[in-house]
Image (cartoon, rainbow, N blue to C red):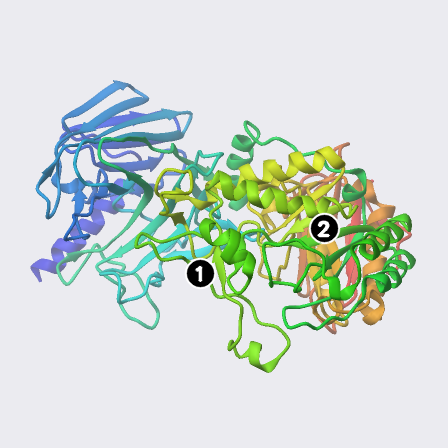
Amino acid sequence: MKNTIRLLFIFAAALCLAQAGAPRAAANEIILKDARLLVAFDSDTGALVRMQNLETGWLMQRRPELGVSFRMHAPLADRRDNFILGQKQRATKAEKISDTEARFQWTNLISEHGGTLPITFDARVTLTDGTLRFNGTVTNRSTQTVETIDYPYVGDLNAPSREARLDARTMWYDNLGSEEIYPRFENRQGYWGVLYPMKTLDSNRSLLCLLQSQKEGLYVGIEDTEQRYYVQYTFEEYPGVTDSIRHGVPKEDEISGLPVHIAFRMCHFIFTAPGNTTELLPIVFKGYQGTWHAGMDIYKEWRKTWFKQPHIPAWALAVHSWLQLQINGAEDDLRVPFKDLVEYGKECADNGVGAIQLVGWNYGGQDRNDPLQDFEYRLGTKQELKDAIAKIQSMGVKMILFGKLNWSDMTTQAYKDTYQKYSSVDPYGIPYMHGGYTYTTPTQLAGINTRRRAVLDFASPACRDELAREFNKVLELGASGWLFDENCHHSPVKFCFDPNHGHPVPGYIFNGDMPLGNQLRAAADKVDPDFVLAGEAQMDWMMQQYSCAYFRCSDNSTPVERYIDPQAPLLVAVTGVDDREMLNLILLWRYIISYEPYNFKGHVTDFPLTLAYGKKIDALRGKYKEWIWDAEFRDTLDAKVTSDGSHRYSVFKTAAGKYAVIVINTSRDKPLTATVALAHDAAFRAATPENPDATDSDGTITVPARSAVVLMEK
């Protein structure tokens, strides 16, 4: 009974605090505050004990007793599990410099199993117009390597209310993915490896994490434009979920006498060796109101300060479509001789397809003999390939060659002679390996003779130079571009520990992505500044080097890269024989069509139903280019669509400030009636892929099953 009364009291007190606005300051707190945000630190320990969005009332860090300053990992020679817990440290300095700045220092840190270590951590926290920035410096005078530091550390992350949902949203593959944090928390790390349910999300995929609730969110950003080192967004749920079926987070503040809370920390993989100092990457917190779009707007504003717009040739910016064609796979299915490629080019020209992505032109076929970019002599001579490329491009169809540089096929002599010395190795000196892909034959599809691949060390300047020399073979063929498949993939590697690769140990592999891209771009510019460097769903910062991206999407995708960069050439695969649903998404999100009949092994004319509808979509986009191609993509902002059926919609804003709204009917057999409303009164013109001549509309439209309507504001 006493415990029940105590729990009720705690809950009531917390509720009163949330309703009353900013809680009153304790005597030992350092408080930073402006009109938008309040954050408090314990002056004895430096722990972050409270954080509140003053505009919305959201108390993100609620209970001071669960506040944490930081955590470090400094393994011992005979015990790797040696943490330095912020809860057991006293701050040697805790100074409030002003109402918007505080500084902290911790020295001679007490580790769990290695005694006191001569390590110093200095932190600086600033608050500017609702933006909270965390900077830090680790100075290591111990004999241990400080592998990681968790900072900042929110020990009691709360949703805006007990009833609200909270998701962690990060970018990957042109999608804003979502991991539920509350009220469900599913362990992603494997029960055998952790004490409490845990989720980690990776900075090599996303420089931001949106903690998104229904009506507001917290933007968490890593201010790193060079991929200096690896960071994880880490979530941990204490003391565990209520049950292992639904993975529910207990709603009480305590269960079985243990505190219930979710910790959120930024884990920096710094590997600071003895005698060294590391400046931490700045971490930014900023609250926002609204959907994920408002969070991404914060990123977009920061992006303007560093993103360098690449040169993109006019043809890649125009309305057009591609064909992806594989002419040889890894099991010697030599399908199309070089001299026969012209037939495919003519078909593309006749059907308005503006480019061919050619896969398997290089020796051994797709996913074999990488990273070599030699031509496949069994399909013809080098001159026959060059002639075919030239003839196809004379028809107005661009040729984009496909290749990979980040792996080395371990079955090849080139691996033994050249690339083995550039293979990434783990802390034990053992080479990392990627499992490879399987093709065509039962033996390989069963994984029996799959060609395993070493992961090349992009952090090594010498390795990058070798790969740049290989890329020159592509430039000799006269194509209009090259698509670097998997250009942001280094699985399963984050770091290389080889001391002979010309980088600090360990070398962060992803730190070499942009330098290699710059080398390839410089080489291409010497041949043709209009040469297109493309990639497979590379991260947003790599769009500076690889200006065109290719990927696959689904009806569960969130078009985040399109929202960030409305004009970037983004291609999406279409593989179905009557693929209207995917084509409608491509229309909705302003993607370029990549036709891929028979999983990119056929003619563009092999699926006439898909081709016919795709041509209508491109014709519509060409006719109303100002409205749905050259305009700013707003996703679902600035308009509201209601219907009596199942629909999706997107909004575009023209340079003149007028709006266009695309509505698609996702039903396979039923038409729907939809009404489009803007924030102001408007009259429209309506057009469809089947009926492209626009007619007047009052904003209420009928959309046939599996089709779309474009409404354009008069």
On the question of residue 70 being in view, the answer is yes
Q: Amino acid at mark 2?
A: Val
Residue holding disc 2: 676
Image spot of residue 568 (x, y percent): 68, 42
Spatial CA span between label 1 and label 2? 53 Å
Image spot of residue 210 (x, y percent): 45, 45
Q: Earlier in the sequence, mark 1 or mark 2?
A: 1
Q: Tell me: 96 left or right of 516.
A: left
Compared with 148, 379 (above or below) is below
Q: Tell me: 196 left or right of 367.
A: left
Quadrant of the snapshot with the N terminus: bottom left
The residue at 33%/63% (across/down) is 187
Q: Regarding mark 1 in the picture, which secondary structure is present there?
A: strand
Q: Amino acid at mark 1?
A: Met
The residue at 49%/38% (across/down) is 461
The residue at 85%/68% (across/down) is 605
Residue holding disc 1: 433
Compared with 299, 595 (above or below) is below
Image spot of residue 98 (x, y percent): 28, 17
Q: Tell me: 441 left or right of 7.
A: right
Foreground of the two, 33 or 380 = 380
Residue lying at the far bottom of the rendered structure = 442
User: Residue 335 is drawn in which quadrant?
Assistant: bottom right
Compared with 50, 14 (above or below) is below
Image spot of residue 586 (x, y percent): 71, 56
The residue at 10%/45% (across/down) is 114
